Amino acid sequence: MASMRTILILAAILLLLVAVPPFLGIAWQNALVNVLIASLFALAFNLLIGQAGLLSFGHAAYFGIGAFAALHLMIAVEDGFDFPTPLLPVAGAAAGLLVGIVAGYFATMRSGVYFALVTLAIAELFHSLAPHLQGVFGGESGVSSMRMPWQGIVFGSIIEVYYLTLGWVLICGLALWTYTRTPFGRLTLALRDNEQRVRFLGYDAHAAKVIVFAISAMFSGVAGALLAISNETANYSLFATDVSAQVVLQTFVGGSTVFFGPVVGAAAFTLFSFLVSDLTRSWVFYQGLIFVLVMLFAPTGIGGVVQFHARHRRQLDRSRLAGPYALALLGGLLIAGGVVYLTETVAVLFGQGYAVRMRDAVDGLPNYDLFGISWNPVSILTWLLPLVLVAVGGVILVRARRSIAGFWDRVGRSDGPVETKAAAPGGPA
Amino acid sequence: MKRIATTTIAAAGALVAAASAGHAEPLKIGIIESLSGSQTSTGRLYATAVEYGVDKINEAGGFNGEPVQVTEYDNAGGAPEAADKFRQAVADGVDIIFQGASSAIAGQLTEDVRKHNIRNPGKEVMFINLGGEAMELTGEKCQFYHFRFTTTAPMRVNALVNAMKEAGDLGTKAYAINQNYSWGQDVQAAVEAAAGEGGYEVVDEVLHDVNKIQDFAPFVARIKAAAPDTVFTGNWSNDLLLLMKAAGDAGLDVTFATAFLDQPGNIANAGKTALGHYIANNYDNAASESDAFPQAYKQATGHVPIFVEGHSAFALAQLQQALGTLDLGGGDIDVTKIALALEDTTYETPVGPVTVRKEDHQTIRPVVVSKVVENAKYPADDTDMGFETVKIVPAEEAIYPVQESCDMQRPEE
Amino acid sequence: MEFAIISTLNGVTYGLLLFMVSAGLTLIFGMMGVLNFAHASFYMLGAYVAYAVSSIFGFWIGLIVAPIVVGLIGMAVERFLLPRVHAHGHAHELLLTFGLALIIEELIKLFFGDFPVNYQMPADLRFSAFSVFGSNYPFYRLFIGGVAVVMFAVLWLLLTRTRTGIVVRAAERLPAMAEALGHNIPMVFMFVFGTGAALAGLGGAVAGAFYPTNPNMGIELGVIVFVVVVVGGLGSLKGSLLASLLIGLFSSFAVGLDWSLAGLFGLFGLGDWARSLGGLMTLELSSVSATIPFALMLIVLLVRPAGLMGEPN
């Protein structure tokens, strides 16, 4: 599997991750820390769904536990306990593992959707109990500490935190990858595909599932600990449903069937929120939209699509595919433009500010500003523009998709990169 | 989208000014608010008020020869995200941070500010807290670079007790129902503490989960059993609405003494049930004879100030006044000097003067106690109901002593 | 006694509300094996549609239109979206509905804002049905309970006593056979999903007028509803009724009880020791009443993993 080519690509990415950040601004360094943490969290989460076929909706619990454990250790270090700061995530790993064993014991009693619901409820249990347990979780304001210097490293700047995080994420990522190669990793794959058979082979399926669960929780705990180190605080909101939901979104948009898929998703969504969340109030909506579109049209995620092309690169005929792919991109962009325009328009027209202006307006509906242009809400042009964008984009996309699907059909790969029954994913996914 | 436009304009203005005034550094303000997530509605109001205040500063010529720049950051209602946005704000060179919608986030930000200032002497950042009312922010966590421009639980409760007793609506039996976190616990403690002063007995008290209870009828049954005259509650959002509705439906005959009844949507949703209940807050439009401020605010934002907007705008006005006493001579921004100037400022709001208490940076401020009435001067939520001022409790009566846990390290002067 | 009676009344009506929302979820899961994560969003959508319609045409029209609109949306989801991911298994169906839940919530915020909207029951329903121990019992609570009971009865009869019900159940057990017998199975599934969604919509329209209608109402109730179906046994209508009532009663009684683990230890003379530990030991039941459903769920899982009425895996 690990071909020369893959190794070269990974080495190049590694080099970039090590060499480039010192030259970036603090904001970007910080964003990259978040990308790394989200990537590790998604990888840990994907151990469950990708390896064992267990879909957890409550991974925030182990992420949060890891954060609190690391933070309590950090407080101890601040109070004079002699422990190297870079090893703080060990506490997160231990706590994640312990809680993972207990929670996993309950959750893996059931499989399928039951499992999803139980994990959701366990996380919710943490979320609702944590603020009451002042001593451990510090009430609603959480617990707070400060990174202490170690061996001459101050850990005061973000770049130091970045390298600490990078180191841990690389080690954990490698460990997770190695895990999938071990005999036990193979066994968990079999659990996903045919649990009955695993049982007949004489293995205790429940125990095996608890172990996978605990390992996944352990690495989630490390990710949480890294966040705690970066934030220097932990708060019960780490247990919130949003946190669990984010990792699900990221993993599946990235692609849960490919090892590095979750990393792609985590990076894409984290950077997306870094770049977009302060620009528009509707960014959560776009996130949901991207997720649903990926689920509908590319269920294997970005990673799956990339892997498909990598696997069939010999059949890839760039000269014949470049055109349709560019066309598909154009169609997707047009549709995305139309949808963004409509969403932002609705956000303005149904917003509070506009309601007041409407009441004060002398005649008819007042104009509104969007993208630096003043629009008239009753003018046909205002509404025709997005519709034309979406319609033209849709036509282009359907045509492009047809020729792309035709190409893959001809080379005998009817299970094309995207669902052949429908158009390719639109939007800036 | 509006933010980009204003920032661009501000930046363009800054460029022009920079060309003429050399290297003057503009003052940068960051609003780290809950602009998505469940507390969006409140976060949005804080942001609007701060932007209004900044516009006022810029209309008067800005600061340090430059227009003040303002940037919004969305903390999505969570402390971890707020920590992240804080780092982004610092990267953007923000000098003063504003936040109001959550005590938990205020706790996060004040810690972030403290650590940042320890690590970056000379490049300090300060935090103006518009709504985090947790006592610990001016207690264990108190620090020089945090200023609280709002009330706290004892201030609100003492004002309620004071005004309701005068109006003869307090009775002799009180009940405290609150959310089980620091704010609710603070309110409960304040209700217990004020019992002697108010001449009432706390017949029962209960703390419940925050924003998780769907059905308040069982709580109302419990209140009913204790037969109180007044029910004190610091509840906000759904927890307040559901409680009042359940009480109204059960025909419970009590007066509610609240802190957040003016949150938009409450009055409309509670309907006639809300009539006669009390609220203590920082400001209410009806509390002042003059309608100059509400009109000016409406002129700029399209609506008269509601909920937290009034006192937030005053906080900016006070900052403006403090900035007016400073002259950095077109040089670098020195946040410590701004903080020291703010300590010495007294701002006259329409309801009375606001000053900063130097020991813990809690503002000493008047508290307005109002009651829900029909045909109010400023109707709430498009209903005919609204708030009528019962009493403005003067600042010196509302304030409480500095908490012993506060140990503030002042910068060397 | 007074406490017990009032708590029972409150608990039962709250339980029935939970049932009203979980009925549709149970129906869809029981018949199609799809866990609809967007179910609570359909509930919220019902409340908002009812609000929008009732502000123009009055409360009762809103109550009728909301389930129809939400049911149609549910049908569209089943017809156009679910088949696309069906081949990838139930997990993908769940993920799709989860994404839909996100989108619905954000759309609601986009159109109706973040504040609660002013959705009220009509004034002529706002009266007290009776009075127990001097406390009025609002008629509307009985109304909510009544709707839930009627819902249960109709669903039950429909599924067990009518021809349609037999076809639906046949479609669930042996879809190929039912299809061979000339039944339009895709239509049946679409109908089932639409009905489930419509039930959630009706629940939202009825309950939204009593509880606040805001963009968080779906999430707030959603998690509890999932607990209900796990405790009751996924797919079992009777199970979810039983679990709803149990959770309703537990939550209602917990409020009045200042019990804590320390108190329990006190029975054995260990009270002071337990209190000195603090933390979990001293938490009072009344302050964590919202946590009870989750704890109950874990207990049920330990004792009876299939849920109260569910069939074993």
Image (cartoon, coloured by chain):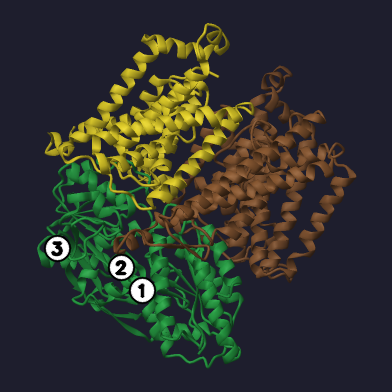
Chain colours: A brown, B green, C yellow
Q: Residue furthest right?
A: A4
Which residue is disc 1 drawn over? B313
Q: Look at the numbered disc 3 and give the secondary structure of its residue.
A: loop
Tags 2 and 1 on a common chain: yes
Chain assignment, label 3 = B
Quarter assignment of residue B172: bottom left
Asked whether disc 3 touches disc 2, contact meaning CB atoms under 8 Å apart, the reply is no
Q: Amino acid at mark 3?
A: Gly
Which residue is disc 3 drawn over? B199
Please tell me which residue lies in front, A84 or B218: B218
In the picture shown, does residue B378 fall above or below C213? below
Mark before the other along the chain sequence, 2 or 1: 2
**Badge 3: residue crowd in 10 Å (few <14, some 14–19, many ≥20):** some
**Badge 2: residue crowd in 10 Å (few <14, some 14–19, many ≥20):** many
Quarter assignment of residue B404: bottom left
A314 displayed left or right of B135: right
Q: Residue furthest left?
A: B168
Q: Residue at x 43, y 57 (%)?
A: A348
